[in-house]
């Protein structure tokens, strides 16, 4: 798994950045990140990232996929530090569900990578 940290970091940061673009620029509703369509977008983006990061791996695919989701969560908190320190951000239950779906999406993408790799062999 240590050989794939660059792919994990790129996939996690790109997934969170694309999700931010969706939530802040493309969505038609307020607080879309806590609604079903926002949760689905988070899952799909991180599934794509998990697939990309885990595809060349020979083993530890699930760990790679989960790491993609964790990197996305950590990146979210890193860019939210000013808002957190100002006390202007709340974390309702749906925020934690959203973060859980990021990890689940990364794992699902890694599982798909394993299935696709097995079919090629």
Image: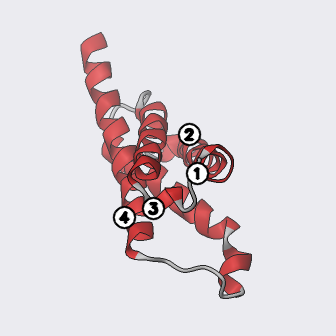
Marking on residue 84: none
Query: Is residue 22 or residue 6 the one in the foreground?
Result: 22
> How far is mark 3 from mark 1, CA to CA?
15 Å
Q: Quadrant of residue 7?
A: top right
**Which residue is labeled 2 in the image?**
7
Quarter of the image for residue 117 reads: top left
Disc 1 residue crowd, few under 14, some 14–19, many 20+, Cα 10 Å: many
Q: Position of residue 41 (x, y in %)?
A: 46, 44
Q: Alpha-carbon neighbours of circle 4 within 10 Å: few (<14), some, or many (≥20)?
A: few
Is residue 93 visible in this depiction of the protein?
yes
The residue located at (35%, 29%) in the rendering is: 113
> What residue appears at the point 58 percent right and 60 percent down from the top-left corner?
30
Q: What quarter of the picture does the N terminus occupy? A: top left
Q: In front: mark 2 or mark 1? A: 1
Q: Residues within 10 Å of mark 3 (few under 14, many from 20)?
A: some
**Considering depth in this image, is 36 or 85 the residue closer to the camera?**
36
- What element does badge 1 sit on? helix
Task: Between label 3 and label 4, give the one nearer the viewer.
Answer: 3
Q: Are marks 2 and 1 in contact (CB under 8 Å)?
A: no
Residue 80 vs 35, above or below: the answer is below
**Where residue 97 is drawn, which disc sits there?**
4
The reply to whether the C-beta atoms of the residues labelled 3 and 4 are less than 8 Å apart is no
Measured Cα–Cα span from mark 4 to mark 1: 15 Å
Q: Using the image, tell me which numbered label, if any, was put on residue 34.
A: 3
Secondary element at image label 2 = helix
Q: Which residue is mark 1?
A: 16
């Amino acid at each position: 798994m240590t050989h794939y940290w660059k792919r994990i970091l790129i996939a996690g940061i790109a997934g969170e950045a694309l999700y931010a673009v969706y939530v802040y620029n493309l969505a038609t509703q307020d607080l879309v990140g806590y609604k079903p369509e926002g949760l689905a977008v988070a899952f799909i983006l991180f599934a794509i990232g998990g697939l990309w990061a885990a595809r060349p791996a020979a083993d530890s695919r699930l760990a790679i996929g989960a790491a993609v989701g964790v990197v996305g969560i950590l990146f979210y908190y890193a860019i939210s530090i000013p808002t957190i320190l100002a006390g202007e951000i709340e974390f309702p239950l749906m925020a934690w569900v959203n973060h859980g779906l990021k990890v689940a999406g990364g794992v699902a993408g890694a599982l798909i990578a394993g299935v696709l790799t097995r079919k090629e062999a």
